[in-house]
Image (cartoon, rainbow, N blue to C red):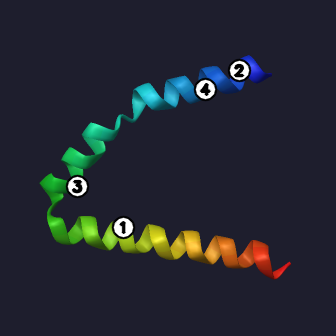
Amino acid sequence: MKKLNLLLFALAMVAISGCSVIGGIFKAGAAVGVIAVVVVIIIIIWLVSMFRSK
């Protein structure tokens, strides 16, 4: 099972490289990138607050 998780992680790293994601953000525009970052930060804060409130 551990090897399967490692294999899936390696496959995800190959499939979604960081450079292509950054390139896509710059192609779409800086405003869309800023909005995406803000949304991700809000989701992370929301998830952390959900787990801490239990």
The residue that mark 2 highlights is 4
The amino acid marked with disc number 3 is Ile
Verify CB contact (< 8 Å) between mark 4 and mark 1.
Answer: no
How far apart in space, not on screen, are marks 4 and 2 (Cα)?
6 Å
Task: Using the image, determine if residue 8 lies above or below residue 23.
Answer: above
The residue that mark 4 highlights is 8
Disc 3: CA contacts within 10 A as few (<14), some (14-19) or many (>=20): some
The residue that mark 1 highlights is 37
How far apart in space, not on screen, are marks 1 and 3 (Cα)?
10 Å
How far apart in space, not on screen, are marks 2 and 1 (Cα)?
31 Å
Answer with the quarter of the image where residue 43 lies. bottom right
Which badge, 2 or 1, is on the more N-terminal residue? 2
Tell me the element at label 2: helix
Which badge, 1 or 3, is on the more N-terminal residue? 3
Residue 25: give its label: 3
Tell me the element at label 4: helix
Tell me the element at label 1: helix
Verify CB contact (< 8 Å) between mark 3 and mark 4.
Answer: no
The x, y position of residue 34, in whole percent, is 27, 70
The x, y position of residue 29, in whole percent, is 14, 63
